Structures are given as structure tokens and as C-alpha cells.
Amino acid sequence: MEHSAKERGERHRNGGSEGLISRLVTVDLVLTMSQRLHLLAELNEFDSRTLNEVSIQVLNRWAKRIETEGLSVSLDSIAENALLSFSLPDNADQLANIGELANIGDRLIDSAAQIESLLCTERMTQSLRTMVLPELENAANSGNPRPWGETAKEITGLANGTHAARKLQRFCGQLLIWDNPPQGSAYRKLLSDGADCKAPALPERLRAKLKERFLREKKFLRSSPRK
């Protein structure tokens, strides 16, 4: 039996490899996990002390990851969902392998990190949209409009007018999706006209802001790892 409960209990008594016990590991969690494991036929041969020690070690492994990665997910949630998955009928051939329970929890922590990243990105986008859209709308309503061709070269940094216009056209389409300006706003109309090849003249202030956005997105794409 790989990584048996007895072997993990011995590792815990000898100090194990996880170091100090995290404060996230509570008596309630250890008791709940050890009792849930004891109810499994494949593990009820082990005494409560061994299962308690195994539970502490597995919970501490997850807790250390949560703390190290700065995640907001609770250890309670990881433990509850890991135990649920571990005890499912289609996982019956793994019930004697406590290492699989630890791996399930690790995968759940990976998922939690992805979810947290998505939520943070969405909240940041909403926050930026709330703060930035009024500025962009004011810029779209400002004066001193400049020709589309000249603006395209300035924003994209391309010398070829045709290539610059096409790139700015695509960028206007992307901004329509990212910023989602309110219907009827001047900013939305200029972006829509730009994306629809109507070559609108863009106010000087708006041109400066779009150039800043374009360069920031370009830098972000260059710094992002290729998959």
C-alpha cells in the first residue's frame, strides 16, 4: 500500500517533512478528517491515533500551500471537498492510498488559485472601468480632432499608414469589448466608427490616452509567457 496511514503516522511522530504545524490546522478539522477516514472500510483497521496523525500531516501540507501562495480559500473547504472526492465510488481502488487524498487536495488548491485569479482580474477590470471610463468619455468630447491616418501612425508607431490604420481598427474593436462603454456615449461612438473602418477623427486628448493603452497592452503581451 503506497504511503499507508501507518507510514504517514510514523513520519509525523518523527517530525515529517512539513515542519511546524500551521495555525490553520484546527482540532475540529483534524477530528472531522480522521473520523471520515475511519468510516472508510479500507482504513478502519487503523487506530484513531494513527488517523489523527495522518490527518494532521495532510491538512498541514494543504495549509502550508494556502499560506505560501497567499490564497483566500479556506482549509475547511479544501478538506471537505477532498474528502468528498476521495470517498466517491469511482475512486474505490485508491481508498487505501492516503497519498491520493493529499493529491486531490493539491488539485483543489490549484483550482482555487485559478478561481481567485479570475475573480481578481474581473474585479480589477470592473474597478478600472468605473474609474477610467469617465476620463475617456471626457477625452472623447474634447476638441482638436486629428485625422485618422495621422492618429493611427502615432498610436501604433507604424510608418506604413495602411498597416497602422488596420492595427488601430483592430484595437478599437478590442477596446469596445474590454471597456464596454455605455450606449450613446461619445467614446463608444468613436470606437465603433474606428472598428467599422469609418476612420473618425480622434480628439488630441483621446489620442494620447489610446496611445498609452496601446503601449501598455503591447508591453503586457510581450511579457506574458507563451503557452
Image (cartoon, rainbow, N blue to C red):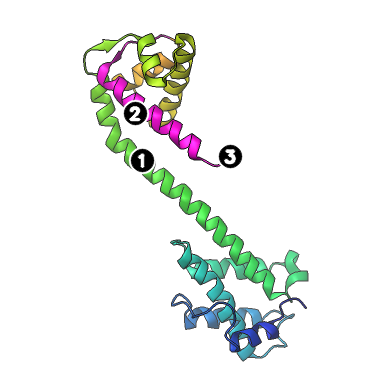
| Residue 226: mark | 3
Give amino acid for label 2: Glu
Q: Is residue 162 above or below residue 85?
A: above
Q: Position of residue 90 (x, y in %)?
A: 75, 64
Q: At label 1, which amino acid type do we have?
A: Gln
- Residue 189, percent from left and from top: 35, 17
Secondary structure of the residue carrying tag 2 is helix
Of circles 1 and 2, which is in front? 2
Identify the residue shown where x is 32% and y is 10%: 201
Query: Picture quarter containing residue 41?
Result: bottom right
Magenta stretch contains residue 223:
yes
Percent position of residue 44, x then y: 70, 85
Count of picture labels: 3
Q: Report which residue position mark 1 lands on.
A: 126
In which quarter of the view is residue 93 placed?
A: bottom right
- Queried whether the magenta region covers residue 179, the answer comes back as no
Looking at the rendering, in which quadrant would you find the N terminus? bottom right
Query: Residue at the spot x=47%, y=77% of the render?
Result: 22
Foreground pick, 177 / 69: 69
Determine contact: label 1, label 2, CB under 8 Å: no
> Mark 2 or mark 3, which is nearer the start of the sequence?
2
Any part of residue 180 in sight = no
- Magenta stretch in the rendered image: 198-225
The quadrant of the image that shows the C terminus is top right
Q: Secondary structure at mark 3?
A: loop
Mark 3 and mark 2: span between their CA atoms? 24 Å
In the rendered structure, the answer to whether residue 225 lies left or right of residue 85 reads left
Crowd rating for badge 3 (residues with CA inside 10 Å; few <14, some 14–19, many 20+): few
Amino acid, disc 3: Arg
- Residue where numbered disc 2 is placed: 212
At 36% from the left and 11% from the top, the residue drawn is: 150
